[in-house]
Amino acid sequence: MESRIKIAPSILSADFGILRDQVIEAQEGGADYIHIDLMDGQFVSNLTMGPLIVDAVRKSTNLPLDVHMMVLEPSRFVSELVDVGADLLTVHYESAKHIHRTILDVKSLGAKAGIAINPGTSSDVIKELLDQIDVVLVMTVNPGYSGQEFIKSMVPKIKNVRKMLDDSSSEVELEVDGGINVDTVKLVADAGADIIVAGSAVYNHKNTVAQSIKNIRELIF
């Protein structure tokens, strides 16, 4: 029986010298999405990839591109990101003055919209947004860097969001991102995640990308 949970490798942990190959390896290894982290050096202190990288990844795969926008006032970038091939744009609840307007901007351009919430943000904030979004992303680390340790106290929060979605008969998917590896992935799966983001657990020097994805998938049946 195939696991219902989707795996989204995060290219923040990939080798950018061979990025195209690493994206293709993820697709051939059974990934469901490619997760792309955008950071502007303002909402978080780190500065990473932008629309040019999204465009390059789009040309390398037909998998849906899951773009996680860790940027202030994300509406500034929505149109350009959709133009270069983003399928899902997830913005942080904490990052926009007018979050409803940002969601509408994304949806009006034909992309899916997600809302991310930081570890310190209550899950209650998403209740009024459920009829407008496609994905809720629960962060299990503080955003900004890959390779951080999973915050185990976020597991009850994942369960709470799962219950909220189930109680409302919502079709919104629950995504979890941060510190997920072979030691923590089952906690996330058992808590009710639909989509699991994995960076260094997929892109590492211990296994091939395909083997790493296989190892994760075997743990979440």
Image: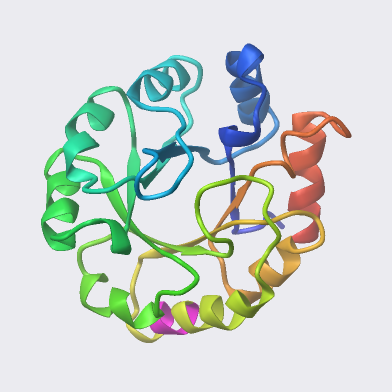
Q: Position of residue 175 (x, y in %)?
A: 49, 60
Q: Position of residue 157 (x, y in %)?
A: 52, 80
Which residue sits furthest right?
206
Which residue is at the front of the view, 79 or 29? 79
Measured along the vertical axis of the image, is residue 105 above or below residue 65?
A: below
Quarter of image, res 124: bottom left
Measured along the vertical axis of the image, is residue 166 above or below residue 22?
A: below
Q: Residue at x 23, y 24 (%)?
A: 83
Measured along the vertical axis of the image, is residue 101 above or below residue 68?
A: below
Which residue is at the front of the view, 86 or 199? 199
Q: Give the extent of the magenta segment.
A: 162-166
Q: Residue at x 13, y 46 (%)?
A: 105
Inspect this view and state whether residue 189 appears.
Answer: yes
Q: Residue at x 17, y 38 (%)?
A: 76
28 horizontally vs 74: left or right: right
Q: Residue at x 40, y 25 (%)?
A: 54
Inspect this view and state whether residue 221 appears.
Answer: no
Which residue is at the front of the view, 59 or 81? 81
Measured along the vertical axis of the image, is residue 78 above or below residue 155?
A: above
**Residue 172 lies in the magenta-colored region:** no
23 horizontally vs 218: left or right: left
Magenta span: predominant SS is helix
Q: Position of residue 95 (x, y in %)?
A: 28, 56
37 horizontally vs 171: left or right: right
